[in-house]
Image: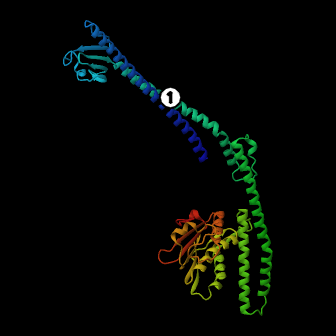
Amino acid sequence: MQLRHRLRTRIIFSFLVFGTLLSVLFAAAVLFLQSWLEDALIARTLEEELDQYLAELRRNPSVVEPFYSRIQGYVTRPGRAEIVPEAFRELSSGVHDVAADNKAYKAAVRKDEDFWAFLTYDVSENRELSRRLVWALVGAVLLFSLLSLALGVWSAGRVMAPVSNLARRLEALEGTERQLHLARHFPDDEVGQLAGVVDEYSHKLNELVERDKAFNADVSHELRTPLAVISGATELLLAQPDLPAKQRERLLRIARAARQCTDITTALLHLVRAERGSAGEASNQDVGAIVEQLVQNYRPLIEGRELELKVRQSAKLNVIAPEAVIAVVLGNLLGNAVRYTQEGEVEVEVQTGRVQIVDTGPGIEPDELPHIFDRHFRGRGSGGKGSGLGLSIVKRLCDLYGWRIHFANRSDTSGLMVSVAFFPDRDTVGNDA
């Protein structure tokens, strides 16, 4: 919509500027030609009249001085110009513009050895006519500018009508998955070609999306069967009463890993379908219990490190969502904290409406914080760990369920603080993503 308005405005503005400039140039040309022709005509007339009078005066000294209603002539001897008005006495030979007695004159002067001749022409009315002409041309410029504006509005409407029609049809299809057939609504012109390209691109994009959905759905579905087999086998082995402690611990790790894989495939399936889960999956979940289970899953990963995992439940927190989705979101965040914190502690606190994870790791560079959710982005301190997809998946899941996630470096010491607000309308976390 904004682009269409800009194109329409550009067309109107182009017509307005073109019409105005053309009118201004025409008016300037008229004024220049009028002034130049008038000055040239008057000057030539005065000089011809003066030359003719002096020639006749030399042939017949009794010829009287020329006199007209707007032309005055004066003839005298050199050095004796008392009869000539003061404004013209000191003028040299030639044609001059003179202002005197609130009037404008053209003065032709010829100072020869035997005669001084002056011929003046009152051009005040000409100047007044010129001023009127200027105002008339200004009005004409304004009129033609308005006409150009009206023509631009009309032309822009005609030119942009097919583009506006195409935009409206695209807006009507927004949010739907129907195949586009826009080209049939337009003639075989530039807009029709554009509609055809959009149709072709939409067709290819739909095919790509459908293949992607089918692939992810098939992978997620097919992975559930072997994961179920692994989980069932580990449960049977764990049920043996004489199982050694070390083998039991290993089997428990396998069972936890299988459960984690199941949660991931379930969460990815929700992302592929862009749905929040069925009524059975999206039941009321105890987030504190999920956090306890996640911490138990990660405890074996910190063996040999001076790192302590803590869980603190400041409030009871229940969220209506699939358990797998909550586990994937919090599990990724907890896994990152454990992976990058070599010593110290990682504390997970369940608060009112949100979960906060605080670690004593290196934190994130301030210039990298805006990019942490980008796919395949890894910070300078990652050391090549991970694929850069975990936080992107977390962000997409949070967007799907309307949760809000916030990253910030700790101000009191080194480390990172991550918060997930499950009810953002009631939460007061700042600078959230």
Rendering coords of residue 207 (x, y %) = 77, 58
For image coordinates 71% across by 92% down, the residue present is 246
Q: Nearer the viewer, residue 193 or 298?
A: 193
Query: What's under tag 1, amino acid-wise?
Result: Leu
Relative vertical location of residue 161 with respect to residue 337 in this rendering, above or below: above
SS type, badge 1: helix
Query: Could you tell me which quadrant the C terminus lies in?
Result: bottom right
Relative vertical location of residue 33 with respect to residue 17 in this rendering, above or below: above
For image coordinates 79% across by 87% down, the residue present is 237
Residue 352 appears in view:
no
Query: According to the image, label 1 marks what residue?
Result: 143
Rendering coords of residue 134 (x, y %) = 42, 26
Examine the image and state in which quarter residue 81 appears: top left
Examine the image and state in which quarter residue 238 appears: bottom right
Residue 199 appears in view:
yes
Q: How many marks?
A: 1
Q: Nearer the viewer, residue 153 or 415?
A: 153
For image coordinates 77% across by 77% down, the residue present is 227
Taking the image as shown, residue 7 lies to the left or right of residue 31, namely right
Rendering coords of residue 88 (x, y %) = 25, 21
Q: How is the image coloured?
A: rainbow
Relative vertical location of residue 381 with respect to residue 146 in this rendering, above or below: below
Rendering coords of residue 110 (x, y %) = 28, 19
Relative vertical location of residue 248 with respect to residue 268 in this rendering, above or below: below
Q: For mark 1, does the 10 Å Cα neighbourhood hold few (<14), some (14 to 19), or many (20 or more) residues? A: some
Taking the image as shown, residue 358 lies to the left or right of residue 221, namely left
Q: Nearer the viewer, residue 187 or 35?
A: 35
For image coordinates 46% across by 28% down, the residue present is 29
